[in-house]
């Protein structure tokens, strides 16, 4: 009996999560977040490039939506300020286990490659702002930590699971979106495909 109730609860929670995700992302235009260029044929890539030439959006080839946030140190940072260089936008929180596991690799990636990393903290999900500072110190992070205190940017980018990372090319276009923790090797592979 207890197993049936537990199973029913789990099924209900999964169903609710799927429903909630589909309702929040219902107006997307055939989002293909997880398809990499190597999984697409040349015709698909050419059609996508023509259709999405100057469209602002979250799909591959779209111009990434611009945003402005304040860093942990109080400086204002705008995504469009980095046009002309590759950017990785990583959405994370200090309480997130997979976020913790990818941070050492992200720091190494930042130090070894010519890429800007904008780590967007989901500040409204944190218990205390000090938890963010402690996290940054614990992992000795040197890239900018942006504070999304009102969930404006995470809502703009339709962030559901964290971590989620967007790799943006030098033209400001979405190259790839990754859900979940990335390894150093995965970061390098996507970076090299972009160049």
Image (spheres, rainbow, N blue to C red):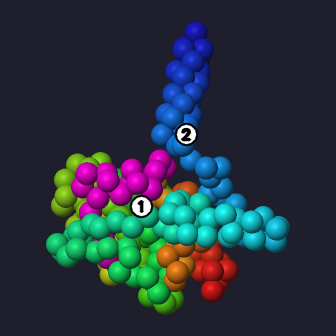
Q: Position of residue 55 (x, y in %)?
A: 54, 64
User: Residue sitting at 51 percent across and 35 percent down?
Assistant: 23
Q: Nearer the viewer, residue 1 or 155?
A: 155
Marks 2 and 1, how far apart at CA: 21 Å
Question: In the image, 5: left or right of 126?
Answer: right
Does dot 1 land on a helix, a strand or a loop? strand
Residue 91 got which mark? 1
Task: Determine which quarter of the picture holds residue 72.
Answer: bottom left
Q: Position of residue 185 (x, y in %)?
A: 62, 77
In reply to whether residue 78 is colored magenta, the answer given is: no
User: Residue sitting at 31 percent across and 51 percent down?
Assistant: 151
Assign the C terminus to one quadrant of the image: bottom right
- Using a 10 Å C-alpha cutoff, classify the residue at mark 2 as few (fewer than 14 neighbours), some (14 to 19) or many (20 or more): few
In the image, is residue 11 above or below residue 130? above
In the image, is residue 4 above or below residue 55? above
Does dot 2 land on a helix, a strand or a loop? loop
In reply to whether residue 156 is colored magenta, the answer given is: yes
Q: Are marks 2 and 1 in contact (CB under 8 Å)?
A: no
Assign the N terminus to one quadrant of the image: top right
Q: Is residue 96 visible?
A: no
From which residue to which does the magenta span run? 143-161
User: Residue sitting at 19 percent across and 58 percent down?
Assistant: 129
The furthest residue to the top: 1
Residue 26 got which mark? 2
Task: Determine which quarter of the picture holds residue 78.
Answer: bottom left
Q: Nearer the viewer, residue 14 or 83?
A: 83
């Amino acid at each position: 009996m207890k197993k049936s109730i537990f199973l029913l609860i789990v099924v209900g929670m999964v169903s609710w999560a799927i429903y909630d995700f589909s309702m929040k992302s219902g107006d997307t235009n055939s989002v293909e977040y997880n398809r990499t260029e190597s999984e697409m044929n040349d015709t698909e890539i050419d059609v996508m490039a023509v259709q999405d030439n100057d469209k602002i959006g979250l799909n591959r080839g779209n111009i990434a939506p611009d945003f402005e946030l304040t860093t942990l140190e109080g400086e204002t940072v705008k995504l469009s300020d980095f046009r002309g260089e590759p950017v990785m936008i990583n959405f994370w929180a200090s309480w997130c286990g997979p976020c913790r596991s990818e941070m050492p690799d992200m720091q190494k990636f930042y130090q070894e490659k010519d890429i800007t990393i904008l780590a967007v903290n989901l500040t409204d999900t944190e218990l205390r702002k000090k938890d963010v500072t402690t996290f940054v110190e614990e992992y000795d992070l040197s890239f900018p930590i942006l504070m999304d205190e009102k969930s404006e940017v995470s809502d703009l980018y339709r962030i559901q699971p964290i971590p989620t990372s967007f790799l943006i090319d030098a033209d400001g276009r979405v190259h790839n979106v990754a859900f979940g923790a990335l390894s150093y090797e995965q970061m390098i592979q996507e970076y090299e495909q972009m160049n």
